Structure formats: C-alpha cells, structure tokens
Image: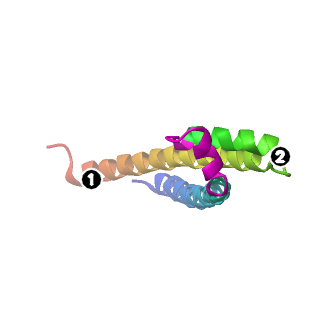
Amino acid sequence: MDIHKAIAHESDIDERIKLAKDYAKEREEAFKAKYKLDMLLVANLSEIRGKKSNVGYDMALLMLMEIDFLKIEDTNAVREYYKDYLYHTSRYKGLERILSSFESKTTFYQSLMRYQREGEK
C-alpha cells in the first residue's frame, strides 16, 4: 500500500469514527422515544386490553395513538414519540449499513496488503 492509499484509508477511518458517534446518538434517541412510548403504553394498557385482550405491540401503539387523540391533553405526545422512534431507528439502521460498507472496504485493503506481501501463489 502506498502513502496515498494509506492517507485515504486514514480519512476513511476518521469518517467511520464520526459515523459511529452519530450511530450511538441515534440509538440513544431511538431508545428515549421508545421508552416514552412504552411508559404511555403501560399507563393505558388496561384500557387497550379492555378493547382487545390479545393485542400485539404494534397494534397497541396504534390504539394508544387513538386514545391519545381522544383523551390525553397533549394530543401530539404519542404521535411525536412514535415519529421520533421511527425516525431515529431508521437513521441508526442506515448508519449500520454505512459502517458495514466501511468494514468491507477495510477488509478489501487488508486482502490487498496480504496479496502484496505473499504474492500470487
């Protein structure tokens, strides 16, 4: 590997570090939104189960949004938490894919260096 490729790879590493920090932030924000949703869900679970005894998580969230729309004073709370949860989850999943592609690039460079060191057999 020549010096130009090494410098380019170092730049990639710096970008990976930045993306990893962004990833951690998005995971934390997704957690916060999901936690708030879950706490509101627990507070309204008996009412939700009264309407449908064997309710799944996704349907319970939809029913919670309905309750939120009809009864809870801050009618945007559940919808905002849900939107934040979906947004930050999709962001961190996208960042996972980008970080994975950087790992593939690093593996490629490692293979090239191994090939250069050992030569064609």
99 on left or right of 23: left
* Circle 2 crowding by C-alpha within 10 Å: few under 14, some 14–19, many from 20: some
Q: Secondary structure at mark 2?
A: loop
Q: Nearer the viewer, residue 89 or 66?
A: 66
Q: Nearer the viewer, residue 26 or 4?
A: 26
Give x and y (percent) for residue 45: 61, 51
Q: Earlier in the sequence, mark 2 or mark 1?
A: 2
For the stretch drawn in magenta, the main secondary structure is: helix
Amino acid of disc 1: Arg
**Which residue matches tag 1?**
114
The stretch drawn in magenta includes residue 49:
yes
* Residue 90 sits in quarter: top right
**Which residue matches tag 2?**
75
Q: Is residue 42 visible?
A: yes
Q: Nearer the viewer, residue 71 or 29?
A: 71
Q: Residue at x 45, y 47 (%)?
A: 100
Q: Residue at x 53, y 40 (%)?
A: 55
Measure the C-alpha gap from mark 2 to mark 1.
Answer: 60 Å
Give x and y (percent) for residue 10: 52, 59
Indicate the quadrant containing the C terminus: top left, top right, bottom left or bottom right.
top left
| Nearer to us: label 2 or label 1 | 2
Amino acid of disc 2: Thr
Give x and y (percent) for residue 97: 50, 44
Q: Nearer the viewer, residue 61 or 93?
A: 61
**Segment colored magenta:** 42-57
Q: Is residue 90 visible?
A: no
Give x and y (percent) for residue 66: 73, 38
